[in-house]
Amino acid sequence: MKLPAISFEFFPPKTPEGRSKLQATRQTLGAYGPEYFSVTFGAGGSTREGTLQTVQDILAAGQMGVPHLSCVGAERASLKALLQEYQALGVRKIVALRGDLPSGYGMGGEFRYARDLVEFIRTEFGKAFEIWVAAYPEYHPQSRSPADDIARFADKIKAGASGAITQYFYNTDAYFHFLEQISAQGVDVERTPIVPGVMPIASFTQLARFSDACGAELPRWMRAKLASYGDDVESIRAFGTQVVADLVDQLAAVEAPALHFYTLNQPGPTAAVLDAVGYSRRS
Ligand code: FAD
């Protein structure tokens, strides 16, 4: 079976120790030959410098760095300046998002939705960047309705997105159903790849917290089993590796266009899944 191409997501580290740890993580995961490393962006610009610095570190190591950019609370001039900086660095691919401001910030800024950012980048930069956007097979928690979420997603693609990376899921039916629904809205999934986002499992409490916050379902049977291990981290990781490796197998079997791993800057859980599935590692 041909294994899908892979990419890895990091968040920008806040300290020099975090930066050198991430360099080691990049080395470990770089051995699996990823297409690129992406770097998240704190909504409202809180990690503007950190994201830029991390992307520069990746590029300096001769790897492909892909910055995320979120538009909520942002001004056009400031995003344009940042995009010009990325363009000058040789960045060719961006993940364009709305983002979530912390509660109490309101919305503000000159953009409302990710679609506005996609349109802005296409207007200002033409085809200089591939623009990737977020997709939600289990629907975005703030959507008006499932049908509206699908229609708004299709708008985002029609505004000029090159492809999408999904929120993580553990139930492939949601992903397949999503593909059917967006195809019915005129999205050509052969030309506009919808890349599954994969969340390896390192900690039950952290995963449960994320899932509750972002609206990704942690299936009941997985929640019960993970909870039953208590503080036994080894068993949590072994079970997590097996479940996520099965998920990757299922996605590889249907020739998913690629896979994007949410690494949380930790090499271990992602590497364990890749090893279990049979991805080879350059020494
Ligand atoms: P949008 O596509 O704008 O959608 C947001 C909501 O608005 C949806 O409910 C949609 O249905 C609705 N909507 C869209 N258009 C309209 C309209 N015209 N009228 C009414 N409703 C509408 N967050 C960060 O802050 N930084 C990151 O780096 C980051 N990286 C991410 C990477 C991936 C792969 C994913 C899946 C998510 C990431 N996020 C990140 C989280 C993301 O910012 C949040 O999920 C956010 O709530 C939505 O962003 P979006 O780009 O999907 O928004």
Image: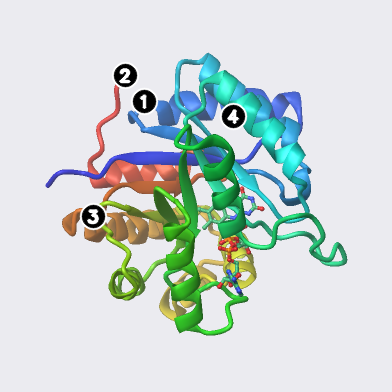
Q: Nearer the viewer, residue 10 or 180?
A: 180
Name the residue tied to disc 1: 31
Circle 4 SS class: helix
Q: Quadrant of the C terminus?
A: top left
C-alpha span from label 3 to label 2: 34 Å
**Which numbered disc, 1 or 4, marks the residue that appears first in the sequence?**
4
Q: Residue at x 46, y 23 (%)?
A: 27
State the residue position of label 4. 22
User: Element under label 2?
Assistant: loop
Q: Which residue is mark 2?
A: 283
Q: Are marks 1 and 2 in contact (CB under 8 Å)?
A: yes
Q: Is residue 144 left or right of residue 234?
A: right
3D distance between C-alphas at marks 1 and 2: 7 Å
- Of discs 3 and 1, which sits in the foreground? 3
What's under tag 3, amino acid-wise?
A: Glu
Name, please, the residue furthest toward the right: 104
Disc with the residue nearer the chain's start (4 vs 3): 4
> Measured from the top left, where is residue 48 in percent x and y?
73, 36
Q: CA distance from mark 2 to mark 4?
A: 19 Å
Left of 152 or right of it: where is 247? Answer: left
Mark 3 surroundings within 10 Å by alpha-carbon count, few (fewer than 14), some (14 through 19), many (20 or more):
few
Q: State the mark number for residue 121.
A: none
Residue 190's label in the rendered image is 3
Within-10-Å neighbours for mark 1: few <14, some 14–19, many 20+: few
At x 45%, y 83%, the residue is 147
The residue carrying pointer 4 sits among few (fewer than 14), some (14 to 19) or many (20 or more) residues within 10 Å by Cα, namely many
**Which three-letter amino acid code belongs to the residue tagged 4?**
Leu
Q: Regarding mark 3 in the picture, which secondary structure is present there?
A: loop
Chain-order first, disc 3 or disc 1: 1
Does the residue tagged 1 have its C-beta within 8 Å of any atom of ligand 1? no
Q: Nearer the viewer, residue 196 or 149?
A: 149
